[in-house]
Image: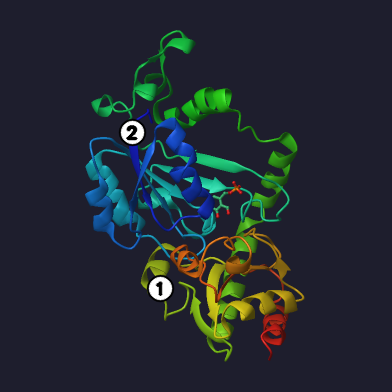
Amino acid sequence: MSPGDEFIAARKLYGGSINQFTHAFKSFGWNVVWADTDDVESFRRAVSPKTKAIFIESIANPGGSITDIEAVADVAREAGVPLIVDNTLATPYLIRPIDHGADIVVHSLTKFLGGHGNSLGGIIVDAGTFDWSKDGKYPMLSEPRPEYHGLKIQETFGNFSFAIACRVLGLRDLGPALSPFNAFMLLTGIETLPLRMQKHCDNAKAIAEFLSGHKAVAAVNYSGLPSSKYNALARKYAPKGAGAVFTFSLKGGYQAGIDLVANLKLFSHLANVGDTRSLIIHPASTTHSQLDDAQKTAAGAAPDMVRVSIGIEDKEDLIADLDQALGG
Ligand SMILES: Cc1ncc(COP(=O)(O)O)c(C=O)c1O
Protein backbone atom coordinates (compact mmCIF):
# COMPACT_ATOMS: atom_id res chain seq x y z
CA MET A 1 0.00 0.00 0.00
CA SER A 2 1.09 3.55 -0.74
CA PRO A 3 -0.53 6.80 0.43
CA GLY A 4 -3.84 7.24 -1.42
CA ASP A 5 -4.42 3.50 -1.90
CA GLU A 6 -7.58 1.73 -0.80
CA PHE A 7 -8.51 -1.68 0.55
CA ILE A 8 -11.92 -3.21 1.04
CA ALA A 9 -12.82 -4.68 4.43
CA ALA A 10 -15.87 -6.55 5.67
CA ARG A 11 -17.77 -4.47 8.21
CA LYS A 12 -18.13 -7.41 10.64
CA LEU A 13 -14.64 -7.45 12.14
CA TYR A 14 -12.87 -7.56 15.48
CA GLY A 15 -13.25 -4.06 16.99
CA GLY A 16 -9.48 -3.52 17.18
CA SER A 17 -9.22 -4.07 13.42
CA ILE A 18 -12.07 -1.61 12.78
CA ASN A 19 -10.25 1.01 14.88
CA GLN A 20 -6.91 0.36 13.21
CA PHE A 21 -8.40 0.53 9.71
CA THR A 22 -10.49 3.63 10.44
CA HIS A 23 -8.01 5.70 12.43
CA ALA A 24 -4.39 4.44 12.56
CA PHE A 25 -4.17 3.56 8.86
CA LYS A 26 -5.47 7.03 7.95
CA SER A 27 -2.16 8.54 9.04
CA PHE A 28 -0.40 6.26 6.50
CA GLY A 29 -2.80 7.58 3.82
CA TRP A 30 -4.43 4.13 3.49
CA ASN A 31 -8.19 4.28 3.03
CA VAL A 32 -10.58 1.54 4.06
CA VAL A 33 -13.78 1.03 2.03
CA TRP A 34 -16.35 -1.00 3.99
CA ALA A 35 -18.40 -3.81 2.48
CA ASP A 36 -21.26 -5.84 3.92
CA THR A 37 -20.06 -9.30 5.02
CA ASP A 38 -23.43 -10.82 4.06
CA ASP A 39 -23.63 -9.19 0.59
CA VAL A 40 -20.91 -10.29 -1.82
CA GLU A 41 -22.06 -7.75 -4.41
CA SER A 42 -21.14 -4.95 -1.98
CA PHE A 43 -17.49 -6.09 -2.27
CA ARG A 44 -17.75 -6.00 -6.08
CA ARG A 45 -19.25 -2.50 -5.99
CA ALA A 46 -16.47 -1.28 -3.68
CA VAL A 47 -13.66 -2.17 -6.13
CA SER A 48 -11.86 0.82 -7.67
CA PRO A 49 -8.57 1.28 -9.58
CA LYS A 50 -7.01 2.18 -6.19
CA THR A 51 -8.03 -1.11 -4.50
CA LYS A 52 -5.00 -3.10 -3.30
CA ALA A 53 -6.56 -5.89 -1.21
CA ILE A 54 -9.74 -7.33 0.28
CA PHE A 55 -9.84 -8.21 4.00
CA ILE A 56 -12.39 -10.48 5.71
CA GLU A 57 -12.69 -12.67 8.81
CA SER A 58 -13.64 -16.33 8.24
CA ILE A 59 -15.66 -16.46 11.49
CA ALA A 60 -16.31 -12.87 12.55
CA ASN A 61 -15.69 -11.61 16.08
CA PRO A 62 -17.92 -11.07 18.05
CA GLY A 63 -21.04 -12.05 16.09
CA GLY A 64 -19.71 -15.43 14.96
CA SER A 65 -21.08 -14.94 11.42
CA ILE A 66 -19.45 -17.03 8.66
CA THR A 67 -18.17 -15.32 5.51
CA ASP A 68 -18.62 -16.95 2.10
CA ILE A 69 -14.86 -17.03 1.45
CA GLU A 70 -15.10 -18.53 -2.06
CA ALA A 71 -17.54 -15.87 -3.26
CA VAL A 72 -15.33 -13.03 -1.94
CA ALA A 73 -12.24 -14.77 -3.41
CA ASP A 74 -13.93 -14.61 -6.84
CA VAL A 75 -14.36 -10.83 -6.42
CA ALA A 76 -10.68 -10.48 -5.43
CA ARG A 77 -9.55 -12.54 -8.44
CA GLU A 78 -11.69 -10.46 -10.84
CA ALA A 79 -10.26 -7.25 -9.31
CA GLY A 80 -6.66 -8.59 -9.50
CA VAL A 81 -6.03 -8.06 -5.77
CA PRO A 82 -5.18 -10.51 -2.97
CA LEU A 83 -7.78 -11.81 -0.53
CA ILE A 84 -6.56 -11.57 3.09
CA VAL A 85 -8.46 -13.67 5.63
CA ASP A 86 -8.23 -13.22 9.40
CA ASN A 87 -8.75 -16.84 10.51
CA THR A 88 -8.25 -16.21 14.25
CA LEU A 89 -11.59 -17.53 15.51
CA ALA A 90 -11.60 -20.57 13.22
CA THR A 91 -7.93 -21.63 13.34
CA PRO A 92 -6.62 -23.92 10.57
CA TYR A 93 -8.23 -26.86 12.39
CA LEU A 94 -11.74 -25.64 11.49
CA ILE A 95 -11.21 -23.60 8.29
CA ARG A 96 -8.35 -23.61 5.76
CA PRO A 97 -8.96 -20.36 3.85
CA ILE A 98 -6.25 -21.03 1.23
CA ASP A 99 -8.25 -24.08 0.05
CA HIS A 100 -11.12 -21.65 -0.61
CA GLY A 101 -9.12 -19.04 -2.56
CA ALA A 102 -7.40 -16.85 0.07
CA ASP A 103 -3.95 -15.50 -0.84
CA ILE A 104 -2.85 -14.43 2.64
CA VAL A 105 -4.11 -15.71 6.00
CA VAL A 106 -3.51 -13.93 9.30
CA HIS A 107 -4.09 -15.18 12.83
CA SER A 108 -3.80 -13.70 16.27
CA LEU A 109 -1.77 -16.41 18.02
CA THR A 110 -2.93 -14.92 21.32
CA LYS A 111 -6.25 -16.78 21.00
CA PHE A 112 -6.92 -20.47 20.17
CA LEU A 113 -3.57 -21.19 18.49
CA GLY A 114 -1.55 -20.47 21.64
CA GLY A 115 -4.67 -21.51 23.47
CA HIS A 116 -3.83 -20.76 27.08
CA GLY A 117 -4.10 -16.98 27.28
CA ASN A 118 -0.43 -16.67 28.28
CA SER A 119 1.36 -15.16 25.24
CA LEU A 120 0.77 -12.41 22.68
CA GLY A 121 1.62 -13.07 19.05
CA GLY A 122 0.47 -13.05 15.46
CA ILE A 123 1.26 -14.89 12.24
CA ILE A 124 1.01 -14.14 8.52
CA VAL A 125 0.70 -17.09 6.11
CA ASP A 126 1.59 -16.43 2.46
CA ALA A 127 -0.21 -18.91 0.19
CA GLY A 128 2.21 -18.08 -2.61
CA THR A 129 -0.73 -17.82 -5.01
CA PHE A 130 -0.72 -14.13 -5.88
CA ASP A 131 1.21 -12.61 -8.79
CA TRP A 132 2.51 -9.29 -7.41
CA SER A 133 4.18 -8.27 -10.68
CA LYS A 134 0.91 -7.82 -12.60
CA ASP A 135 0.05 -4.26 -13.77
CA GLY A 136 2.86 -2.66 -11.72
CA LYS A 137 0.36 -2.40 -8.86
CA TYR A 138 2.72 -3.65 -6.14
CA PRO A 139 6.08 -1.97 -6.84
CA MET A 140 7.39 -2.77 -3.35
CA LEU A 141 7.46 -6.43 -4.40
CA SER A 142 8.06 -6.19 -8.14
CA GLU A 143 10.54 -3.28 -8.49
CA PRO A 144 14.21 -3.13 -7.40
CA ARG A 145 14.70 -2.37 -3.67
CA PRO A 146 17.34 0.33 -3.26
CA GLU A 147 18.26 -0.77 0.29
CA TYR A 148 18.97 -4.31 -0.98
CA HIS A 149 21.18 -3.20 -3.92
CA GLY A 150 18.40 -3.40 -6.50
CA LEU A 151 17.07 -6.83 -5.48
CA LYS A 152 13.53 -7.53 -6.76
CA ILE A 153 11.63 -9.36 -4.02
CA GLN A 154 9.17 -11.33 -6.16
CA GLU A 155 11.75 -12.23 -8.80
CA THR A 156 14.13 -13.48 -6.09
CA PHE A 157 11.78 -15.19 -3.65
CA GLY A 158 8.94 -16.35 -5.93
CA ASN A 159 5.99 -17.84 -4.13
CA PHE A 160 7.03 -16.69 -0.66
CA SER A 161 7.81 -13.11 -1.65
CA PHE A 162 5.05 -11.53 0.46
CA ALA A 163 6.21 -13.41 3.59
CA ILE A 164 9.79 -12.30 2.90
CA ALA A 165 8.72 -8.68 2.37
CA CYS A 166 6.87 -8.76 5.71
CA ARG A 167 10.14 -9.74 7.39
CA VAL A 168 12.82 -7.82 5.50
CA LEU A 169 10.75 -4.61 5.13
CA GLY A 170 7.88 -4.58 7.64
CA LEU A 171 9.48 -6.35 10.60
CA ARG A 172 12.85 -4.69 10.03
CA ASP A 173 11.37 -1.18 9.90
CA LEU A 174 8.40 -1.41 12.27
CA GLY A 175 9.64 -4.03 14.75
CA PRO A 176 6.71 -6.33 15.62
CA ALA A 177 9.05 -9.17 16.65
CA LEU A 178 7.86 -12.10 18.75
CA SER A 179 9.79 -12.73 21.97
CA PRO A 180 11.57 -16.12 21.94
CA PHE A 181 9.81 -17.21 25.12
CA ASN A 182 6.39 -16.39 23.66
CA ALA A 183 7.35 -18.27 20.47
CA PHE A 184 8.13 -21.33 22.65
CA MET A 185 4.82 -21.04 24.52
CA LEU A 186 2.85 -20.61 21.29
CA LEU A 187 4.50 -23.59 19.59
CA THR A 188 3.77 -25.74 22.63
CA GLY A 189 0.14 -24.61 22.48
CA ILE A 190 -0.21 -25.37 18.77
CA GLU A 191 0.77 -29.01 19.38
CA THR A 192 -2.60 -29.63 21.10
CA LEU A 193 -4.72 -27.46 18.77
CA PRO A 194 -6.85 -30.27 17.25
CA LEU A 195 -7.69 -31.77 20.65
CA ARG A 196 -8.58 -28.44 22.19
CA MET A 197 -10.46 -27.06 19.18
CA GLN A 198 -12.75 -30.07 18.87
CA LYS A 199 -13.59 -29.90 22.58
CA HIS A 200 -14.13 -26.09 22.37
CA CYS A 201 -16.60 -26.62 19.50
CA ASP A 202 -18.43 -29.58 21.05
CA ASN A 203 -18.84 -27.67 24.32
CA ALA A 204 -19.95 -24.49 22.51
CA LYS A 205 -22.65 -26.36 20.59
CA ALA A 206 -23.97 -28.03 23.76
CA ILE A 207 -24.04 -24.70 25.60
CA ALA A 208 -25.68 -22.86 22.69
CA GLU A 209 -28.38 -25.55 22.63
CA PHE A 210 -28.85 -25.28 26.41
CA LEU A 211 -29.11 -21.47 26.25
CA SER A 212 -31.59 -21.62 23.35
CA GLY A 213 -34.00 -23.49 25.59
CA HIS A 214 -33.49 -21.34 28.70
CA LYS A 215 -36.38 -19.12 29.83
CA ALA A 216 -34.10 -16.14 30.65
CA VAL A 217 -32.52 -16.10 27.17
CA ALA A 218 -34.10 -14.13 24.31
CA ALA A 219 -31.87 -15.30 21.43
CA VAL A 220 -28.64 -17.20 20.76
CA ASN A 221 -26.43 -16.25 17.79
CA TYR A 222 -24.34 -19.34 17.07
CA SER A 223 -23.81 -20.45 13.49
CA GLY A 224 -23.58 -24.08 14.66
CA LEU A 225 -27.33 -24.03 15.47
CA PRO A 226 -29.78 -24.93 12.67
CA SER A 227 -31.73 -21.74 13.56
CA SER A 228 -28.78 -19.51 12.56
CA LYS A 229 -28.87 -17.83 9.16
CA TYR A 230 -25.17 -18.76 8.88
CA ASN A 231 -25.75 -22.49 9.51
CA ALA A 232 -25.45 -23.53 5.82
CA LEU A 233 -22.15 -21.60 5.49
CA ALA A 234 -20.93 -23.09 8.78
CA ARG A 235 -21.65 -26.61 7.53
CA LYS A 236 -19.81 -25.87 4.27
CA TYR A 237 -16.72 -24.09 5.63
CA ALA A 238 -16.41 -25.46 9.17
CA PRO A 239 -17.88 -28.98 9.14
CA LYS A 240 -15.96 -30.02 12.29
CA GLY A 241 -17.57 -27.26 14.36
CA ALA A 242 -18.58 -23.60 14.22
CA GLY A 243 -16.01 -22.30 16.70
CA ALA A 244 -16.48 -21.43 20.34
CA VAL A 245 -17.12 -17.67 20.44
CA PHE A 246 -20.73 -16.53 20.24
CA THR A 247 -23.23 -14.04 21.63
CA PHE A 248 -26.66 -14.32 23.20
CA SER A 249 -29.20 -11.84 24.48
CA LEU A 250 -31.10 -11.82 27.75
CA LYS A 251 -34.79 -11.11 28.30
CA GLY A 252 -33.84 -9.09 31.41
CA GLY A 253 -31.86 -6.58 29.31
CA TYR A 254 -28.84 -4.53 30.44
CA GLN A 255 -28.98 -5.31 34.19
CA ALA A 256 -29.42 -9.03 33.49
CA GLY A 257 -26.13 -8.96 31.55
CA ILE A 258 -24.30 -7.39 34.52
CA ASP A 259 -25.92 -9.84 36.97
CA LEU A 260 -25.11 -12.89 34.86
CA VAL A 261 -21.39 -12.03 34.72
CA ALA A 262 -21.35 -11.31 38.48
CA ASN A 263 -23.16 -14.56 39.40
CA LEU A 264 -21.03 -16.96 37.34
CA LYS A 265 -18.43 -18.93 39.30
CA LEU A 266 -16.63 -21.00 36.67
CA PHE A 267 -16.56 -18.50 33.78
CA SER A 268 -13.87 -15.79 34.00
CA HIS A 269 -14.85 -12.16 33.35
CA LEU A 270 -12.43 -11.27 30.54
CA ALA A 271 -12.32 -9.45 27.19
CA ASN A 272 -10.04 -12.13 25.69
CA VAL A 273 -11.23 -15.10 23.63
CA GLY A 274 -9.77 -18.51 22.74
CA ASP A 275 -8.52 -19.53 26.18
CA THR A 276 -8.79 -23.10 27.57
CA ARG A 277 -10.98 -21.54 30.29
CA SER A 278 -14.49 -20.28 29.56
CA LEU A 279 -14.70 -16.49 29.36
CA ILE A 280 -17.62 -14.07 29.38
CA ILE A 281 -18.08 -10.36 28.84
CA HIS A 282 -21.04 -7.98 28.80
CA PRO A 283 -19.75 -5.44 26.26
CA ALA A 284 -22.48 -2.81 26.90
CA SER A 285 -21.32 -2.24 30.52
CA THR A 286 -17.58 -2.69 29.88
CA THR A 287 -15.71 -2.42 26.54
CA HIS A 288 -18.51 -0.40 24.87
CA SER A 289 -19.81 1.52 27.93
CA GLN A 290 -18.91 4.95 26.49
CA LEU A 291 -21.47 4.54 23.65
CA ASP A 292 -25.19 5.36 23.82
CA ASP A 293 -27.73 2.52 23.33
CA ALA A 294 -28.13 3.10 19.56
CA GLN A 295 -24.36 3.18 19.05
CA LYS A 296 -23.97 0.04 21.19
CA THR A 297 -26.50 -1.85 19.06
CA ALA A 298 -24.88 -0.66 15.79
CA ALA A 299 -21.49 -1.85 17.10
CA GLY A 300 -22.91 -5.31 17.87
CA ALA A 301 -22.90 -4.65 21.61
CA ALA A 302 -26.62 -4.26 22.34
CA PRO A 303 -27.44 -3.60 26.03
CA ASP A 304 -28.93 -7.09 26.49
CA MET A 305 -26.09 -8.98 24.72
CA VAL A 306 -23.28 -11.02 26.28
CA ARG A 307 -20.37 -12.72 24.53
CA VAL A 308 -18.87 -16.04 25.59
CA SER A 309 -15.71 -17.88 24.57
CA ILE A 310 -16.33 -21.48 25.59
CA GLY A 311 -13.40 -23.36 27.09
CA ILE A 312 -12.52 -27.03 27.42
CA GLU A 313 -13.95 -27.70 30.89
CA ASP A 314 -16.63 -30.40 31.33
CA LYS A 315 -19.72 -29.09 29.58
CA GLU A 316 -21.99 -30.25 32.44
CA ASP A 317 -20.11 -27.94 34.82
CA LEU A 318 -20.40 -24.98 32.43
CA ILE A 319 -24.12 -25.59 31.90
CA ALA A 320 -24.71 -25.91 35.67
CA ASP A 321 -22.82 -22.63 36.24
CA LEU A 322 -24.83 -20.78 33.58
CA ASP A 323 -28.09 -22.24 34.90
CA GLN A 324 -27.48 -21.10 38.49
CA ALA A 325 -26.29 -17.66 37.33
CA LEU A 326 -29.40 -17.22 35.17
CA GLY A 327 -31.62 -18.00 38.14
CA GLY A 328 -32.22 -21.72 37.37
C1 LIG B 1 -10.42 -11.85 14.89
C2 LIG B 1 -9.29 -11.20 15.65
N1 LIG B 1 -8.21 -10.77 14.98
C3 LIG B 1 -7.19 -10.17 15.62
C4 LIG B 1 -7.20 -9.95 16.97
C5 LIG B 1 -6.02 -9.23 17.62
O1 LIG B 1 -5.30 -10.07 18.39
P1 LIG B 1 -4.07 -9.62 19.32
O2 LIG B 1 -4.69 -9.34 20.66
O3 LIG B 1 -3.19 -10.82 19.35
O4 LIG B 1 -3.46 -8.43 18.69
C6 LIG B 1 -8.32 -10.38 17.71
C7 LIG B 1 -8.39 -10.12 19.17
O5 LIG B 1 -9.40 -10.32 19.81
C8 LIG B 1 -9.38 -11.03 17.03
O6 LIG B 1 -10.48 -11.46 17.69
Secondary structure found at label 2: loop
* Label ID, residue 5: 2
Identified at 66% across, 85% down, the residue is 326
Q: Position of residue 169 (x, y in %)?
A: 50, 23
Question: Circle 1 is placed at which residue position?
Answer: 231
Q: Residue at x 69, y 79 (%)?
A: 259
Q: Of marks 2 and 1, which one's residue comes earlier in the chain? A: 2
The vertical placement of 49 against 67, above or below, is: above
Q: Residues within 10 Å of mark 2 (few under 14, many from 20)?
A: some
Q: What element does badge 1 sit on? A: helix
User: Does any atom of ligand 1 lie closer than 8 Å to the CB of label 2?
Assistant: no
Residue 118 location (% of width, % of height): 73, 51
Location of the C terminus (image quadrant)? bottom right
Query: Is residue 231 among the parts visible in the rendering?
Result: yes
List x then y, in percent, for residue 21.
45, 44
Q: Nearer the viewer, mark 2 or mark 1?
A: 2
Establish if 258 lies above or below 128: below
